[in-house]
Amino acid sequence: MIHIEQKSYTSQDGNTVIVLTPTGRLDITTAWQFRLKLQECISKLSHHVVVNLSQVNFIDSSGLTSLVAGMRDADKVKGSFRICNVHPEAKLVFEVTMMDTVFEIFETEEEALEGVPRNIIAS
């Protein structure tokens, strides 16, 4: 079982954005639950989702697959799918699999909600 905190925001252009913050491990035992939550949010609540991974200290290929599926679901309905606050221990998985080039990844939840591309962020 995975705990997933869910918050809702309204963006400056009036869109509802759902922020999901899973806690623990996103692996073969929990990825399906997370996948179902993503599907439910995108189909029923909002086409715009931010996944805050600050509380996920481990992610495997099943976890990555659930994120890719969520991104595809959002793309199908012309929505947006962003990831933020990737836990340092999980960040390596994104880099090794080159998924850090596939997803829109932001340092903070605020940046993900604003939609600032990471290459514009001043260092």
Image: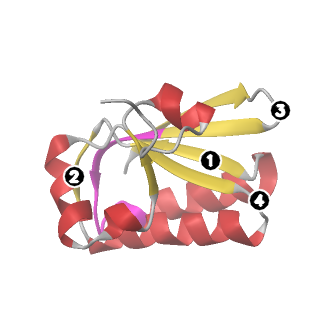
x 46%, y 40%: residue: 120
The residue carrying mark 3 is: 13
CA–CA distance in space, label 1 to label 2:
19 Å
Which numbered disc flags the more N-terminal residue, 3 or 2? 3
What residue type is disc 2 on? Lys
Q: Give the side of residue 5 with respect to residue 86, left or right.
A: right
The residue carrying mark 2 is: 91
Instruction: Please provide percent x and percent y for residue 81.
Output: 59, 54
In front: mark 3 or mark 2? Answer: 3
Q: Give the side of residue 93 with respect to residue 102, left or right.
A: left
> Looking at the picture, does residue 67 appear above or below residue 10?
below
The residue carrying mark 1 is: 49
> Looking at the picture, does residue 85 appear above or below residue 32?
above
Which numbered disc flags the more N-terminal residue, 4 or 2? 4
What residue type is disc 4 on? Ser
The residue carrying mark 4 is: 43
| Residue 9 numbered mark, or none | none
Which numbered disc flags the more N-terminal residue, 4 or 1? 4
Which numbered disc flags the more N-terminal residue, 1 or 3? 3
Which numbered disc flags the more N-terminal residue, 1 or 2? 1
x 14%, y 47%: residue: 89
> Looking at the picture, does residue 89 appear above or below residue 77?
above
> Which residues lie in the magenta part?
21-31
Q: Are marks 1 and 2 in contact (CB under 8 Å)?
A: no
